[in-house]
Image (cartoon, helix red, strand yellow):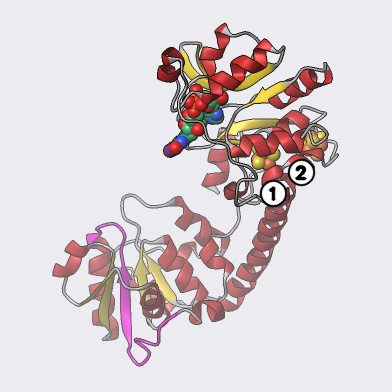
Amino acid sequence: MSGVKICEDLGIKNTVNVLDPTLLLTSNEWREVSSNKFKNEKYILVYNLNRNKKMDNYAKNLSKKTGLKVKYLSYQLHEFYRKGKMYCNPKVEDFLALIDNAEFVISDSFHATAFSLIFNKQFVIVYPDKFSTRLQSILKLLNLDNRVAKNENDLKIVNKNIDYEFVNEKLNIERQKSMEWLLNNLKKMEEDNLFPSKEKCSGCGACMNICPKHAISLVEDEYGFLYPRIDKEKCINCGLCKKVCAYQNDKLEGSPIKVYAAIRNKEDDILNKSASGGIFSSIAINFINSGGIVYGSSMEKENGKLTVKHTRVDNIDDLKKLQGSKYVKSLMGTIYDNIKKDLKNQKNVLFSGTPCQVAALKKYLPQFA
Ligand SMILES: Cc1cc2nc3c(=O)[nH]c(=O)nc-3n(C[C@H](O)[C@H](O)[C@H](O)COP(=O)(O)OP(=O)(O)OC[C@H]3O[C@@H](n4cnc5c(N)ncnc54)[C@H](O)[C@@H]3O)c2cc1C
Ligand code: SF4
Ligand code: SF4
């Protein structure tokens, strides 16, 4: 529940507490993954995430009382020095089997507790100085706060059997609730999203340009790439955004339709400022001289920051801004819409950009493509 509070404090509304993913599967489903090891053994399993002398002593006391040997589970190599059988970083299959076949599990780990619950094990929690509140939260949910040892001699806990009829029923209810919420919201996200995964979106922004309600904005992801996001409050479900997406609707051509080759611009000044032969500038100059408009990528300083974005150019002087390759994504902004206006005003337009930008423009303006 503490996660819900953290989200709410950050202003994230409608946060819901769902079960940890491990608890969404049943014991039978986990046993399909589990290995066949440790089946005929009787042992106490100790899994401590944090170094905890109290837990070691508890295990020793329980071992003495029950006559059971102790197996240790750790993800820290340096714990090999411990007495007893140590399993360091076991395979997932063996990790599951170690818990499933134990007589008692002693731990401070949320996941050891989760799997103990799944496999209906008798377990004892020995809190270290620092522990996850997740652990407290699941114990509280299942009325199992009494599984926390008060001290290393608190062995009477293990005599009290856990009422697994109640726990299983409660877990099933929570499992159903969590699955329902997750599936509904995943489905909703799929419906709300313009693309099923990032690989299916080039971030061309055609959808943002076409939206009659300005409901789409391009939002930066953790790597700085822009992806569209819909503001559902503004959206009228007209479907234009999905229709305009060249990336997802059109079969991408694997081979060029026509190929032209140009070797070298005769003007040294143009050649030196271009990335290769300078053909772009020659065509663009011709285009502007005959009254056309050129759209291409320019790099400009905006608010002290260099920005690469597509720009409209209607004079020879400004053409130099478009020369040369800028090796970062060029922002399209409202370029598709600006081009549409120019074309409607009977202007000829020369557009230069990457293949995904050209495909987006063609899809945006099929009547001119
Ligand atoms: C990001 C990028 C990477 C490239 N990588 C290679 C490569 O590895 N090998 C190779 O042989 N060729 C590459 N090219 C192609 C090659 O640079 C061009 O075909 C060549 O530069 C065109 O030559 P030019 O001299 O006529 O025009 P230039 O004056 O060099 O090119 C200007 C044109 O490029 C466009 N442009 C520049 N940067 C961008 C950008 N970031 N996004 C969209 N359009 C842009 C401008 O709009 C302008 O129209 C790349 C081009 C780009 C844009
Ligand atoms: S139109 Fe462009 S930005 Fe929008 S979803 Fe398709 S590829 Fe992504
Ligand atoms: S469905 Fe229509 S209104 Fe909604 S985001 Fe897409 S284009 Fe905009």
- Please tell me how crowded label 2 is: few (under 14), some (14-19), or many (20+) other residues with Cα within 10 Å: some
Q: Which mark is residue 358?
A: none
- Along the line of sight, the residue nearer the viewer: 211 or 91: 211
Kindly indicate the quadrant of the structure image that contains residue 268: top left
Which residue is tagged 1? 248
Disc 1 marks a residue whose amino acid type is Gln
Residue at mark 2: C-beta within 8 A of ligand 3: yes
Residue 300 vs 73, above or below: the answer is above
Q: Is residue 73 magenta?
A: no
Contact between marks 1 and 2 (CB within 8 A): the answer is yes
In the image, residue 234 sits, relative to residue 139, either above or below, namely: above
Of 330 and 176, nearer the camera is: 330
Dominant secondary structure, magenta: loop
Measured as percent of width and height from the top left, residue 44 is found at: 32, 79
In the rendered image, the residue lying farthest to the left is 81
State which quarter of the image contains the C terminus: top right
Q: Secondary structure at mark 2?
A: helix
Q: Residues within 10 Å of mark 1 (few under 14, many from 20)?
A: some
**Is residue 5 found left or right of 41 in the rendered image?**
right
Identify the element where label 1 is drawn: helix
Q: Report the mark closest to the observer, 1 or 2.
A: 1
Looking at mark 1, is its residue's CB closer than 8 Å to ligand 2? yes
> Which residue is at a point 24% across and 58% down the rendered structure image?
51
Q: Is residue 227 left or right of residue 90?
A: right
Magenta-drawn segment:
34-53
| Badge 2 amino acid | Lys
Write down the quadrant of residue 192 in the picture.
top right
Query: From this viewpoint, is residue 203 visible?
Result: no
Q: Nearer the viewer, residue 254 or 166?
A: 254
In this rendering, the answer to whether 251 lies above or below 83 is above
Residue highlighted by disc 2:
242
